[in-house]
Image: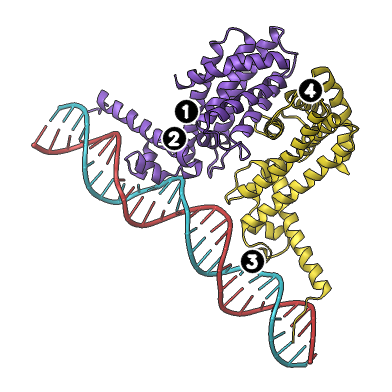
Chain colours: A purple, B yellow, C cyan, D red
Amino acid sequence: MVYRRTHQVVKRLAARRSAILAAARETAAEAGMAAVQIAPVAVRANVAAGTVYRYFPSKADLISELIADVSRDELAAIRRAADAAPGPSSALAAAVSTVALHVLSQRKLAWGILAEPVDVDVTASRLASRREITSEIASRIDAAVRAGHLPAQDTQLAATALLGALHEALVGPLAPDNLDDPAKLRDTVQSVTLLALRAVGVMDARARGLVVQAVLPAKTLIGA
Amino acid sequence: MVYRRTHQVVKRLAARRSAILAAARETAAEAGMAAVQIAPVAVRANVAAGTVYRYFPSKADLISELIADVSRDELAAIRRAADAAPGPSSALAAAVSTVALHVLSQRKLAWGILAEPVDVDVTASRLASRREITSEIASRIDAAVRAGHLPAQDTQLAATALLGALHEALVGPLAPDNLDDPAKLRDTVQSVTLLALRAVGVMDARARGLVVQAVLPAKTLIGA
DNA sequence: AGTCGGTCTGAATAGTTGTTCACTTCTTCA
DNA sequence: TGAAGAAGTGAACAACTATTCAGACCGACT
């Protein structure tokens, strides 16, 4: 007599798994990565600590999936914004300002995913996450270079530097405060996007135009 | 009968303190911040674990001092390089390439000081360290702006972004490998410096010139 | 030489959390 | 309905290290 998993059970299992992951994500967003401990997450997901281990082999796996999850969302948002832009330079501008806004809208989560100390080893997952995002940005830079809008350069290095700049400026310990003020937030996103575009070689005047074009659409696309 | 500390004793105590700090630094440089544990550091410094606590109230204090120490060295190197430059733009270029070279010459240590997860809270110390360095860079940017070489901008934000770019590109997990090859290293430092200068608004052609001027002197000044 | 304050030692302690597992509860299917 | 297997539980366990502290040791002063 073979035991088969009912559709209903499969669904419930998947839901529980998502609930655990969601609980982890909420915890990270609210209180940082350090607060993502098995016991609290289990409570939040309405399961026992042991149950978490039926879904994730270890805490490292749980957090790795969390990172991958958030990373996937961010990558999707970047692609959406960039693909909606009219040309390669606009796409790059849109991608950059999307990262900026996205990161700012969930600062604690972003910091946790990117750089906050975690007691388990999640370097592989973080590495993969960064690689995906930088590659996406790098390919956007590359498109702009091929279109003759930017000078030839090491696009992978440029993309890495560019994201480092955004992250440090926006979620690092020296990030400006009072970013809850929408005007300040918009200014900051614009400044940072401008810096980033100039860094890869967009001329100043042109960059200003691109930034203005990019920031507003990105804002609406974030929520989508 | 009052006990007075002999000069000799004072010297021995200071030496021991330095030895502990040096042991911590060496450990961090060789094996990363995670390896900086009380017991191994004590062994390396030829003292018992308990002795460490006669010099540092806690591990957090030890690591905080380590961070401050390294930071002080880096700041001095930046100032030396920038002050030797002929003008404000050159000074900025020199400062940036000095950071790049300095960081590259001790990648593991830099990563440990800057961002590697540590089990104790050293955020305050890291914050202070970054604040010092970014302020220095910010003031160099400011000088160039005042000299009319750069457009007006939020120099603190720019400095933060700029250092974020350098760090991510050079010591982050996506940093290029084989940087032991001197040619590759020089190229990378130049590329990153170029990116940084363009970001704050140096025109491309001018930036190239500044980079070439800055990188070689910086190299010699590092060792000094 | 002797005493006494300061310094050093390192084994024992303590606190923190991820992980396990014997047991209970639930679900499937004959 | 009841047997068998899957899923869930949560208290107990384990491992890791920072930190402590009672006693050993050292150097300074009489």
A63 in relation to B72, above or below: above
Mark 1 and mark 2 lie on one chain; the one further toward the N terminus is 2
Q: Mark 4, chain letter?
A: B
Q: Is residue B69 left or right of residue A188?
A: right
Q: Is residue B25 left or right of residue B77?
A: left
Residue A25 circle label: 2
**Labels 1 and 2 touching (C-beta < 8 A):** yes
- Front tag of 1 and 4: 4
**Labels 3 and 2 touching (C-beta < 8 A):** no
At a point 58% along the width and 7% down the height, the residue shown is: A86
Same chain for mark 1 and mark 3? The answer is no
x and y percent of residue A6 in the render? 25, 25
x and y percent of residue A190 in the render? 62, 23
Pointer 1 local density, CA inside 10 Å: few below 14, some 14–19, many at least 20 = some
Q: Mark 1, chain letter?
A: A
Residue B50 circle label: 3
Q: Quadrant of residue A98?
A: top right
Viewer-closest of B212 and B187:
B212
Distance (Cα) linking label 1 and label 3: 44 Å
Question: Which residue is denoted by mark 4 in the rendering?
Answer: B202
Distance (Cα) linking label 1 and label 2: 9 Å
Distance (Cα) linking label 2 and label 4: 41 Å
- Front tag of 4 and 3: 4
